[in-house]
Image (spheres, rainbow, N blue to C red):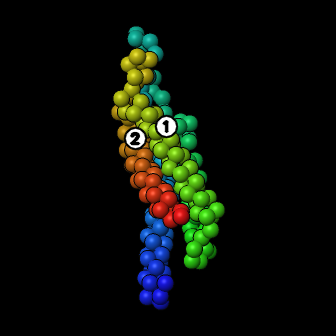
Amino acid sequence: MNGMEMEKGNKENGSRKGVELTMRVLALVLTMVSATVLGVAKQTKVVSLKLIPTLPPVDITATAKATYLSAFVYHISVNAIACGYTVISIAILMISKGKRSKGLLMAVLLGDLLMVALLFSGTGAAGAIGLMGLQGNKHVMWKKVCGVFGKFCHRAAPSLFITLLAAAIYMLLVVLDAIKLP
């Protein structure tokens, strides 16, 4: 290998590292935003509840928060875990100069695969509950709640979409990691 070929290889490695770093920073931002958006989503409404048909309705103050639904808590937790892992993977990328060992590459690849699985499972769980809130379920007589807590639902939906974007970025990172393995 002559000097020109080595320089060209170093530039390609540098640009790949730059692309990977950019994708990881984007994944960090997306997971942080998603966890924050859903984590702070809250809406309080006064709801009229008719207990007995002959009596007037009773007004009750009801609050919708992400912490009231375990699927949303899981979604927030998964995003927080992905956020923490992303910081660690960025540190590994920054610390490792030049070629990384096979073991380190494999560890990062497995971590990225785990993040893909976690992010998709968190989105699936929260999406199922969100859909139930949006449409209700006539079979078990669960009413639609997004009609009452529309502001809360309009905060939950973007959080799910943002997490899907982060999961897609991690899928691309898995491909990049797999290409780097000899």
Q: Residue furthest top?
A: 54
How many neighbours does mark 1 have within 10 angstroms: few (below 14), some (14-19), or many (20 or more)? some
Q: Is residue 164 rendered to the left or right of residue 114?
A: left
Q: CA distance from mark 1 to mark 2?
A: 15 Å
Name the residue carrying label 2.
153
Nearest the viewer among 56 and 102 is 102
Q: Is residue 48 shown above or below 89?
A: above
Up the image or down, 13 lies above or below 59; here it is below
Crowding near pointer 2: few (<14 within 10 Å), some, many (20+)? Answer: many
- Residue, x 62% and y 74% (percent of image)? 95
**Would residue 151 be visible to someone looking at this image?**
no
- Which residue corresponds to mark 1? 125
- Badge 2 amino acid: Cys
Secondary element at tag 2: helix
Residue 19's x, y, as percent? 44, 70
* Residue at x 36%, y 29% (from the top left corner): 135
Residue, far front? 1
The residue that appears at 44% across and 17% down in the rendered structure is 140
Please provide percent x and percent y for residue 147: 35, 33
Is residue 15 rendered to the left or right of residue 182?
A: left
Q: Residue at x 61, y 64 (%)?
A: 102
